[in-house]
Structures are given as C-alpha cells and as structure tokens.
Amino acid sequence: MNTPRSTSEQPSSPDREGAQTTHWLRDRRLRARHRRRALSFFLDWAIWGYVAYAVMFFLNYYWFTRMRIHWYDTLTLPAWGWALTIAATFELAVLCRAFGRSIGLRSFGLELVPADGQPTGVLRRLARILLWHLSVLPLAVGFWGPCEAPWHDRVLGLTLRVSRKRARGRDAADIGPEAQRPAKRAFATQWGVLGFLLGLLTLWLGWLVVQGNLSALVRRAGKAGDLFGQIARPDFRYFVQEDPTFALRKGGFSIVDLMVSTLLMTLLSTVVGTVIAFPLSFLGARNLTAKGPWGWLTYTVVRGFFNIFRAIETLLWATIFAVWVGWGSPLAGVLALTIHTIAALGKLFSEQVESIDAGPVEAIRAAGGNALQVIRYAVVPQVAPSFWAFTLYRWDINVRMSTIIALVGAGGIGNLLFYYKNEGLWSIVGAVVISIVVVVWAMDYLSGWLRERIVR
Amino acid sequence: MTARGMWARLHALTNKLAGAGAALRGGLAPVVLDFVMIGLTGLLLTYTWTWFARGPEQAVYLVIPWWALFLLSVELAGAWESFGVSLGQSLLRVRLLAEDRRPPAFTQRLCHFAAWHVSGLPLFGFLVKPALHERAARLSLQPHITLGSRPPAWYLRSVTWFCMMFATIATAAALGASFSWDSLSRLFSDAWRVAPIWRALVSPSLTVVRDSLSDLVVTLFMAVMATAFAAIIAIPLSFFAARNLSRSPAGRFGYAVIRGAMSILRSIEPIVWAIVFLVWVTSRYASFAGTLALWITSIADLTKLYAERLEAIDEGVIEAIAATGATRLQVMRYAVVPQIVNPYISFTLYRFDINIRMATVVGLIGAGGIGYRLITALTSQRYSEAGTVMLLIVVAVWAIDYLSARFRQRLS
C-alpha cells in the first residue's frame, strides 16, 4: 500500500500538501463523508432489522397465537436466536452495500465506484464483503490509518464518494465533469425493488398491527348508518336552554354558554400568549441578542425554552394543568393554551426577526439609538404584519384545540360533546358537533380574511 | 319567442340579480360588522357586569330583552357609520364622502342617518349602488385614499377607543368565564399534584417504557396506514379536484362535488370521526377505528393540498407537450407528473407528521395506541406512569417531526 490514494484523485487536490499524513478525523470534509458512511450503514442495518421484526411478527401471528402481543416477546427467542438475527441483518446490509446502491447509500447521497474506472466485477464485490469483515469487525482497524478510504476499499481500488447529484464544492471538483449516464429505470435498481417490497411489507404489517378488519366494517355498516342518521338530525333542545341533568357546575351549561366561554378562553390565552411571546421573541433572535457571552446565554436559554415547551403539545399541557388545578376547570385549558402559544409564537416571531433587513438596524444604531429604540424603529415596522398574521393564525389553532381539550379535563365545549357521547344521546352530539364545526369554520374564515388584509 | 331570446333574457336577469347581490354584500358588509361587534360588546358587558354584581354562578349574557339589544346595536351601528368612521368602514377601507370627495357636512350626515332608517333597515336600499339612503344625502361610500390628507392621531379615532373598550370587556369576561376561586387557589397551593409527572418526565421508569413501546408501535402504524391509504385515494381524486384540469361541464360538476365533500369532511375533527368509528367497528378494533378516523381526514386534507398544487402548475409545459400531438395520458405523464412529484411527497410527509400527533389524540378517547394508555393512566391516577408515557409521546413526535422536516427540506 505505497500509493493508497488513486491516481485519478491525485491532481484534483493539489492544495492539500501532505494529505497523506492527515488523519481523516482532522479533515472536515472526510469526517462528514465517514459520518455519512456510518449513518448509511446503520440505516441499511435498521431496514433489515425491520424486516426481521416483521418476519417474527408474521410467524407469531399466523403460526403461533394469531394475536398481537408485545413487540419484545412476539416469539420467545433463545439467546443464540438474537445473536443470529443481529449477525444475519449485518450480513444482509453489507451484501446490499457491495452489490448495487443500497437504500442507505442512496439516502445519504453516497455511491461506491471503482477508482480506476474499470467496471466492478462480481469477484471484486465478493472480495469487498470478505475484506469488510477483516477490516471492520476487529475494532474497525481498517479505519485507523491517516487516509481517505478505509483499508478494505483501498485494497480493492474502490471509493465510496458523494454521489454526483449531491456533490458540492470540493467533492464536486473531485468528481469532475463526467459523461452523463442514462438513469436506470426504478424497477431495475435495488432502491426501486427493495423499496417497493418494504412498502408492501409495511402495509401488510400495519394492517395486522392496527387490527384492520373489513368484515367488522361491513357487518356493522347498518349500525353506523343508524348513528349517522341520528347525528344528521341534530337535536338543538339544549342549544340555549340549560340541560338540567348536565350538572358540571351549579346550574349547568347550554351549548351557547360553553361555546362562548370556549371562545373567551381562546381569546384570553391568545392575547396573553402573544403579549408574553412578543418581548421574548427579540431575546430569542440571533441577530439582535447573540452578541457576547451573556447575549449567547440569553439567546440559548430563550430558544431552548421555546423548543422544549413547544415539543410538549397543548393536549399534554392540558393534561398536566388538569391534574394541577382540577379536572374540568377551564383555567387548566387557558394555561395550557397560553403556554403552548408562548412557545410556538415565540419561535415563529424570533425566526421572523432573524430574517429582517439589517440596514435599518445599523442606521438607527449609527444615529445613536439604544436597544429599545432599535427595536421600536428598525425591527417592529419590518415584522409587524407577519406578527399580526401569525397571531391570528395561532388564534385559529387555539380555537380548534380548545374544542377538544376537554378530553383530558381542561374545560370548554368538549365537555358537552363527551358527556352526551357517553350518555349515547347521539342527536344532541350532532347538535354540539354542528355548532363546533360552524364556529371553527367561521373563525377559520374570519382569521383567513383578516390575515389576507393585513399582509396585503 | 325563440328559445335563444328567452335564454338571453334569463341571462340578463341573472346578471342583474348577481349585481344586486354584490351591491347588497358590499353595502351591508360594514353595517353587519359594526352591528355584530357592538352586539357582542353588549353581551360581554352584561356578562362581566352580572359576574361581578351577582357572582360567577348567576352570570348571564342578557338582562334586557334580546330585541332591545338588537335594536340598540342596530341604532348604534347606524349612528356610528353616519357620524364617524366606524370599525367596519375602517376595516374595509371605505369612507362616507360627498361627490367631490369632501368630508360630508353635518346636515348631510343627519340626512343619511334618517334615510338609513327608511331604506337601510328593510335592506332594499342596499340593492343599488350607491345605496338609496346615500343617494338621498348625496353621499357615497368611496375607497379610502390617504393621499394628501393627514389622518387623525390614533387617540382621536373612535375605532381605537372602541377596540380598546372591546378588548377590556372581552378580557374581563374571559377572566370571569375561565377563572374560579377554587381552581385559582389550587394553582397556587396544589403544585405538588403534578410532581410525579415532572419527575417521570426527567427520569422515566424503564418498565413503563418497555410496556408502552408496543403501544407506540401501534400509534406509529396507525399514522403510517392512514397516510398511505389516504394518499392512494387522494392522488387520483386530486386530478378531478383541480380547477385547471376539469374544464368540461362534467368536469366542473365533479370538481364542485369533490371539493364540497372534502371541505365538509375536513371541517369535522378527527376526534369526532374517531367517536363514530369506535361505535361502528366496536372498541374491540379500537386502533382500526382510530386509523379510519385519521384516514378520512387525511383524504380530505391531502386532496385539497394536492389539488391546489395541481392548480399552480406551469401551463406552458402542458401546451408544449400537447402541441407535439400527445394523448391526454401522455400529457399527464410528461407534463404534469414531473412537476408535482416532489410537492406531493412533501405534502404526504407533512400529513404523516400531523397524523402522528393526531394518532395520540384519537387514542385519548379510546381509539387505541399510546394515547389510550395515557388516558387510562390519568383516569386511574397513576401519574408517574402518565408522565413516562408523555415523555415517550414527546420524544416520538419530536423525532418524526425533525426527520420529516429534514426530508422535506431536501425535497424542496
């Protein structure tokens, strides 16, 4: 291995003198390529692992119990079974990568090509599989040296390079102008065939996992028609008048009562959420805040707050607050909607602030304006329309959300819906559903109309 | 009379009716907006007032008879429009001006207000443009142009004051509607109740994780199945729901039917569908019911998204391919499909994202998956288990969100 780097790559990188001695860990580009190599391998492995899972599931379902039980004990495997499965999936992944372009390689934009331009024969591919075991399995020794490609590729004169389609910058320069090969038809590639089979496998497995059952759907269609009939003849008896048996609080509520209070809940949480998110969004904007160590800290903390609190969804917040302030209390809903509004709007707002034109900011700074004046005269005029649009959009989302948070005990019109559903009074359920649909639709329309006017 | 003459006459009549309808809509819009907002203010004011005066339990929205509130709102709206710049006028950017674009004199305003009672209230005055009462006062609603005139300061506009008043009253009413002393005192004294949830969120119990993973798998497959089958149905449907591809009368009809049906299906929340399907296929097949609920809403949503993308395609390519003598199918294959493949994949992924969230939500009413485990843990007050399940949901949703965002970014 005196000249590990192929001749075709030599002239394309004259700027890297002594690249021979540079370890790939110190070269950003090579590091990225090796990361992609590792990730693509794990994707291939995961795909075959998924197939193995599906096979075990089918074995269990069709031969053993015909029932869906836990994923980890669908078939009680002996220890060597697990070892065998892991080894087999590894081997299959390696096989896929040596013969053709595997799904993992394709997803991460890599391709295995011969460095000398000769076609890769079956023998060379088989040799690669063999050498891979020697080079990777014992502590990945093949990757230790200071070179571009691992040992098993170098010996066989192969390179795993960034594919022509995805190559940018120096990668693209390394590939150089190359004759366009006609693209293969999808069904002639590994991607096409294996992808199609995986799709079918997923649908089959999914049908069993979700307990799909057409006969139940057909057999009880009459029952469903009955139900639809009752819902479609809504009973607006308790639209304005209160239902005496629905005693959530003293006096009970009518549909209109709860609808108004739901809308007020959304109004309150949207307004409070916006008022809090507005100042926070400037602190969470990289271009305004992230200057100096304290600025970075503020920026990171605020953005982290937005990201974490946004990841916990409104319904989960509602769950937490319903446990906290009491089941069925509208306050829980207001708090949940408000917290999620702050996080979601804060993120949208600060992204908007980050995309402003820097010119006015510099102009106001140059004129001696302080931070507040910069925000007031340079930032706010640029972002005001989109802030309003986002707020209205959020209000829309909150209205939708507020109709269902009663499910986890956070108050609102959903209380009635689930109460009558549990009582089996389907025609009143129909009335509630129609009221919700009308209100949501009206809010949607109104907010869309206002947004259009504001942005214009 | 010939059929052609009758047809022309009918056509003229429809045109006239459409014109009257447009005038009615245009003239009525500011009035209706003002009326609704004033009426709402009245209702909310009553609610706030009674909430404070009689206590939260006896708060009502109406103390005066409803017709009195109606009349009062109508009168106030009319007066506001005649004597000032009302909310509706300023939102729709129109002003009541004399013919020479001068602001009206006081007598003209008075005349407009009086005539409005005669022609505006019974609505027939709005059928022509400018409306009859505007003609009587020799005024008309004209588009507002700020050129050359300085608008009054914000604190001198009646709209500002109305909006501030409305915001105050609405906030007060909202506070009244959503706060009760019980829940407020619990907010400050009962934080310990959620301590198990927080504890589980930072240090999940591994046995619960192991047991819940199978439910998480079910939830994931619910979303996958719903999205896949919805895409299979929505892709062909979208070609019939695109305006630019359905120009024939039959196509127009199909377009209207599909779009209408889809917008009805879409406006019903997946949770309601889940309720229906749970009754239909029984809770023995709970996760199937959830999948069906997601499927229905996904079909409606995807058809709309796909069709809108189809309506935005480049027509030039279609004409170019059609000019070479290609059949209809060939035009589809070589002119339409290449333009829509990536957006379609991107929309499908986006919908898959939503479906993952929704799959946990429909689980909450018993339609299987991890949502069902969450709600059972909550109702049986096993809060630390609920916290662990919530952590699983958050992580799964976040991971899928991240992956699908990366994927979509690459597609665009």
Image (spheres, rainbow, N blue to C red):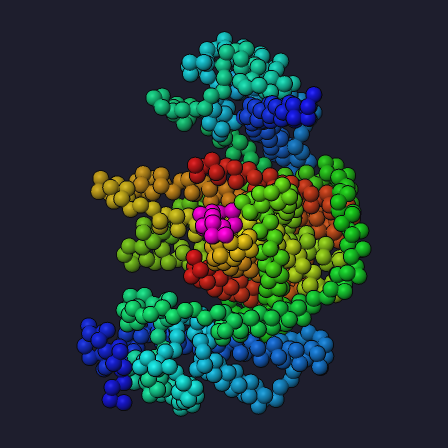
Q: Is residue A158 above or below residue A266?
A: below
Q: Quadrant of residue B354?
A: bottom right
Q: Is residue B335 magenta?
A: no
The residue drawn where x is 68% and y is 26% is: B3
Res. B328 visible in picture: yes
Instruction: State whether the magenta stretch is mostly helix, strand or loop.
Output: helix
- B325 or A421, nearer to the observer: B325
Magenta-drawn segment: B310-325
Q: Is residue A290 above or below residue A32?
A: above
Q: Position of residue B126 (x, y in %)?
A: 59, 20
Residue A73 point in image, percent of width and height: 64, 80
Residue in the foreground of this view, choosing between B406 and A357: B406
Whether residue A253 is visible: no
- Residue lying farthest top? B107
| Residue at 64% across, 50% down | B269
For this view, does A402 lie left or right of residue A304?
Answer: right
x then y, percent, for residue B298: 60, 55
Q: Count of labels shown? A: 0
Is B321 colored magenta in this rendering?
A: yes
- Residue at point 32%, 57% (across, down): A296
